[in-house]
Amino acid sequence: MTQIRHDPVAPTGIRRLASGGAIDAHRHDDHQIIYAGRGVVAVTTSAGSWVAPGTRAIWVPAGTVHAHQAHGGLELHLVGLPATENPLGLDAPTVLAVNPLLRELIVAYTRSPADDSPERARLRAVLLDQLRASPQQPLHLPAPASPLLRSLCDILRADPGDGRTLAELGREVGASERTLSRLFRGDLGMTFPQWRTQLRLHVALVLLAEGTPVTAVAHRCGWSSASAFIDVFRRTFGHTPGSQAAGRSASRTG
């Protein structure tokens, strides 16, 4: 049985990881805001995974066993909050929108974790106000419990560009389209097309962070054209995949 470590990373501060680096499964007594100032961070629990670029942060409740994965050179900003203080009222990992002001507040607050000055206390208060106002984003990729769904989802994880219908995939895993559709709704809380789109967006973020060109990302993730990919990406994340890649390049040279 894998031993779960307790607090291997300080709950507040900055951690840098090379692309492909990881922080193994662990838990904190504190709630934690996880933000990638550079690169893309993936957070995984037994319930699934969450991926966040620089316009998103991930809320992880106290006691949640989770692991981090770095995509692109990662600058991880961590904000810890006491378990008794839950400004968002959330009891499950959640992706939050990060506007430019919240980004600067997180970066400034994590720069000097040992500072207990009145100025930093005021900074923290504004940060919490901004967190409360941050819209939640439906960017969770749930992990299936059903063996049938696990088999099907593993096929798509191995090749997110696989464009087969649910009926065609069902013939490979030995289940009807109706059965699989019911399992997606009951087990994962979303339809098959919704889950596949989430998977493709998660993989796209990783590929962009690793420097893959936008057109190649669109092709590998199963979009019919680069323009179709750009449209879905913009509607989901609020910016184009090209600007995501440009931000990555700027952070490497900045």
Image (cartoon, helix red, strand yellow):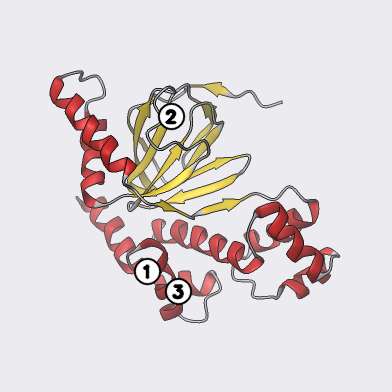
Query: For mark 1, does the 10 Å Cα neighbourhood hold few (<14), some (14 to 19), or many (20 or more) residues?
Result: few
Foreground of the two, 91 or 206: 91
Element on which disc 2 rests: strand
Q: In which quadrant will I find the N terminus? A: top right
Residue sitting farthest toward the right: 174
Nearest to viewer (mark 1 / mark 2)? 2
Vertical relation: 55 (above or below) 229: above
**Can residue 41 be spotted in the picture?**
no
Element on which disc 1 rests: helix
Residue at 40% x, 75% y is 231
Residue 103 position, x and y percent, is 25, 45
Of the two numbered discs 1 and 3 on the same chain, state the one appearing first in sequence: 3
Q: Which residue is mark 2?
A: 31
Foreground of the two, 141 or 216: 141
Q: Which residue is mark 1?
A: 234
Residue type at numbered disc 2: His
Q: Is residue 152 left or right of residue 18?
A: right
Gap between marks 1 and 3, in whole Å? Answer: 8 Å
Residue 119 position, x and y percent, is 13, 25
Of the two numbered discs 1 and 2 on the same chain, state the one appearing first in sequence: 2
Query: For mark 3, does the 10 Å Cα neighbourhood hold few (<14), some (14 to 19), or many (20 or more) residues?
Result: many
